[in-house]
Image (spheres, rainbow, N blue to C red):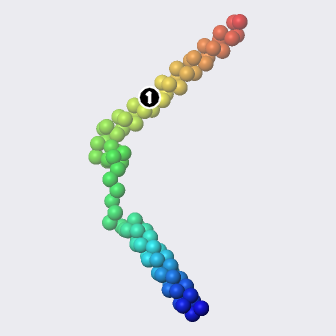
Amino acid sequence: MSNFVLKSQVEMFDLIGNILFAADVWAGNIQNEMDARYVEKSSLTNLFTEHKFLGWAGLLLIFVALAAILYFQFQAWEQEDQEQKYK
């Protein structure tokens, strides 16, 4: 009986040690993610800071494309409404 209890205690301490080790590693990773020296390299941000013309031209192009799609879609809907009125 005492051998079983001793073995169970050793396994329990081993399990607790593994859990504490995993928690320590996880907390260390969080600390690295929060490090103030971390600088993210973002291509999208670079478009507006380093290549200002390309960034704003691309943004304008997206806006014009969306406006054109909406304009022509409304024209098609309006034409369908006019055709339904004459039927």
Residue matched to label 1: 64
Please state which of residues 64 and 37 is positioned toward the viewer in this rendering. 37
In the image, residue 70 above or below residue 31: above
**How would you rate the neighbour count of disc 1 (Cα within 10 Å): few for under 14, some for 14-19, many for 20 or more?**
few
Outermost residue, left side: 50
Residue type, numbered disc 1: Val
Looking at the image, which residue sits at the far bottom? 2
Image vertical order of residue 83 relative to residue 68, above or below:
above
Q: Which residue is drawn at 54% across and 91% down?
A: 3
Instruction: Please state the horizontal and vertical placement of residue 67, each as a whole percent of the image.
Output: 49, 28
Nearer-the-camera pick, 26 or 16: 16
The residue depicted at 63 percent of the width and 14 percent of the height is 80
- Specify whether 49 is left or right of 4: left
| 70 left or right, relative to 78 | left
Q: In this view, does 84 lie to the left or right of 49?
A: right
Element type at mark 1:
helix
Point out the image quarter for the N terminus. bottom right
Give residue 28's position: percent from left, percent from top: 40, 72
The spot of residue 32 in percent (x, y) is 38, 68
**Relative height, residue 31 to residue 39 (above, below):** below
Which residue shows up at 31% across the image and 42% down it? 52
Q: In which quarter of the image is the C terminus?
A: top right
